[in-house]
Amino acid sequence: MRKREKRTASQRAGGGGGGGETQSSSQAAAAAAVEQEQQQSTKTTTARANKRVKAAKPEGDPEYFEDKRNLEDLWKAAFPVGTEWDQLDTVYQISWDFSNLENAFEEGGKLYGKKVYLFGCTEPQLVFYKGQSKIMYIPAIVAVVSPFPPSDKIGIKSVQREVEEIIPMKQMKMDWVPYIPLENRASRVDRLKSQIFILSCTQRRAALKHLKIDRVKQYEYCLPYFYQPFKEDEFEQSTEVTVMYPVEPPVVCEFDWELDELEVQMLILL
């Protein structure tokens, strides 16, 4: 009888331990469910907050871009001959107003319907800009009305040079090329009859470091060399002549048709 009681007590003890484990598992599952529900609630709250933020974001005003003018970049296209290479960027940093040049090509303008050749140049000036004094290169555009290219030569002249050097433009990689207005750039170039030509330079700035200093300096001292092919060079004619008397020995003398008029009359009388 004692053995059976012990077994029964043992079984009871074992049965009590299994109930405790079941209760602990149920509590852990309940805690996990609560934690999962809290995480889901947090995600839902965050998503709603994001939606609210996006909904509250005001729409920006629409941006408007001005239409480009037909000859807006004409002044930039004309090469600023004689300008130092390291100053070209400073020239283009400012949007210079060349509306007067653009208007000249419009109907009623001075250059309308004419064949025009353009080249640029710059003039350094000390100006007060953005609260400080600085040297700025002011661009200018020269327009030449001509039925054909006004020159195919470049003149190189500086204080250091004794004489002016005249060389072909192509030697400096320069040439007159047609300018295509903005509204015609979708058309074939060979079908256009351009009336505007610009001085272009194909010298790459990246290749300047491979050139000699004297060669680079040539670009800083050059300007188009113009001449008038329809007009003969006017040489100043001399009024002095040489007269030889046919005597033995010959007598040779000089006189001026303007200054020695009396002497001429005397010679005629003799």
Image: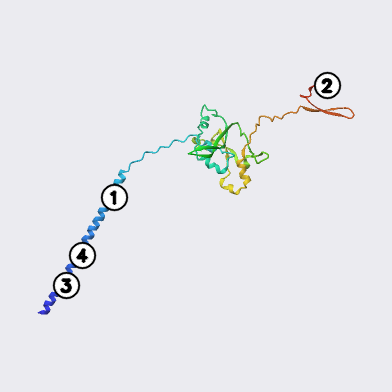
Element at label 3: helix
**Cα distance in 3D space between marks 2 and 1:** 122 Å
Gap between marks 1 and 4, in whole Å?
Answer: 33 Å
The residues bearing labels 3 and 1 have C-alpha atoms spaced at a distance of 50 Å
If you read the primary sequence from the N terminus, does the residue marked by circle 2 or circle 4 appear first? 4
Residue 46 vertical position relative to residue 246 in the rendered view, above or below: below
**Tag 4: amino acid:** Ser
* Drawn side of residue 21 relative to residue 160, left or right: left
Q: Which residue is disc 2 drawn over?
A: 266
- Does residue 55 appear left or right of residue 147 in this picture? left
Residue lying farthest to the top in this orientation: 269
Q: Quadrant of residue 193?
A: top right
Q: In the rendered structure, are the residues bearing label 3 and label 1 in contact, judged by CB atoms less than 8 Å apart?
A: no
User: Badge 4: how crowded within 10 Å, few (<14), some, or many (20+)?
Assistant: few
The three-letter code of the residue at mark 2 reads Met
Q: Tell me the SS state at disc 4.
A: helix
